[in-house]
Image (cartoon, rainbow, N blue to C red):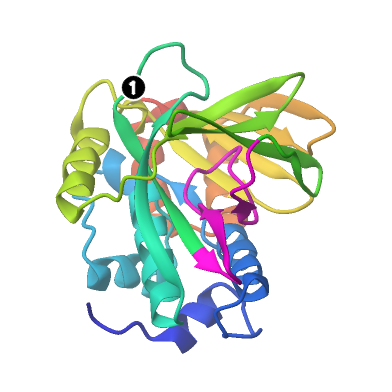
Amino acid sequence: MPAIDLDRYFARIGYGGATEPTPHTLSQLHLAHAQHIPFENLDVLLGRGIRLDLDALFAKLVTAGRGGYCFEQNHLFAAVLEQLGFSVRRLAARVNWGTQRVLPRTHMLLRVTAGGRSWLADVGFGGMGPLLPLAFEPDTPQTQYSWQYRLTEQGGLWRLQTRTDAWTGLYEFTLHEQAPADYEMANYYVSTHPDSRFVRGLVAHRLAPERRLILIGNALTEDTGRASSTRDLTDEELTRLLVEVFALPPADVDAVVRRFPGGAPA
């Protein structure tokens, strides 16, 4: 695996802290990455292939200042952690959030060992995903700013839940390590299959401790953990948001908005 230019990665996520492989370092890196690299699918909508080799990921997410979805973000984050001396296991999950259907395993997450404990690290779930790592402690609520999470386990099947009005599932997974080929197949599905939400329309999320911005098509939800509101954006507002708040390249944003007025395919 090629070495990552850690200085450039740290500059991209605004990180200037410790680099020893400790729980504190893991937590601070996770938070910095989640805040600075948005979740977005512009390349899928523009018909560009989504490559998962490390050179391509670094060029897109770091050099070009872009965002990406789970396979891109968590592959890059895993490589950074391993270069710093963390032990990382790459896993796959079925998403439960927002669906009653049984979906294929199309989400990537990480199990990281630090300080003699195991942690769930996931900088690529977007909207309702964690800002910080979660300890593998079943049935124990874990508070992150204004949001709560918990992990449950039964018969080797783990579930990540968040608390809204009640505990609601985000995704479920086992601890079986995935091979690169598993992710290549899942990545091809989510970036090309007509049933994939990433193919059907615009998806962009931006996370911070004080609020989450969740954009689906032209519908923008602002969630503070205590209150949530949703409104539809005009194409002009959509363009301004993606450029000024999500910090995405104007040329790519303009191309998407022209091809998909209202954030969704015609």
Which secondary structure dominates the residues rendered in magenta? loop
Seen from the viewer's position, the closer of residues 250 and 199 is 199
Task: Point out the residue furthest to the top here.
Answer: 100
- Residue 263 percent across, percent down from the top left: 44, 30
Residue 119 included in the magenta stretch of the image: yes
Point 23% across, 39% down: residue: 186
Q: Is residue 153 magenta?
A: no
At 52% across and 25% down in the image, what residue appears? 97
Neighbourhood count class around disc 1 (C-alpha, 10 Å): few under 14, some 14–19, many 20 upward = few
**Bounds of the magenta span?**
113-138
Q: Quarter holding the N terminus? A: bottom left
Query: Is residue 29 something one can see in this rendering?
Result: yes
> Going by the picture, which residue comes out furthest to the front?
155
Q: Nearer the viewer, residue 48 or 142?
A: 142
Q: Is residue 198 above or below residue 32?
A: above
Q: Amino acid at mark 1?
A: Leu
Residue drawn 45% across and 36% down? 203
Give the percent coordinates (x, y) of residue 36. 58, 63
Viewer-nearest residue: 194 or 166 = 166
Compared across the picture, whether 119 is left or right of 69 comes to right
Identify the residue under disc 1: 103
Camera-nearest residue between 44 and 117: 117
Q: From the top left corner, tell me how far across and down residue 169 is, in percent.
A: 57, 25
Judged from the image, the secondary structure of the residue bearing numbered disc 1 is loop
Number of callouts in the render? Answer: 1
Q: What is the quadrant of the C terminus in the image?
A: top left
Question: Which quarter of the picture shows residue 160?
Answer: top right
Is residue 47 in sight in this rendering? no
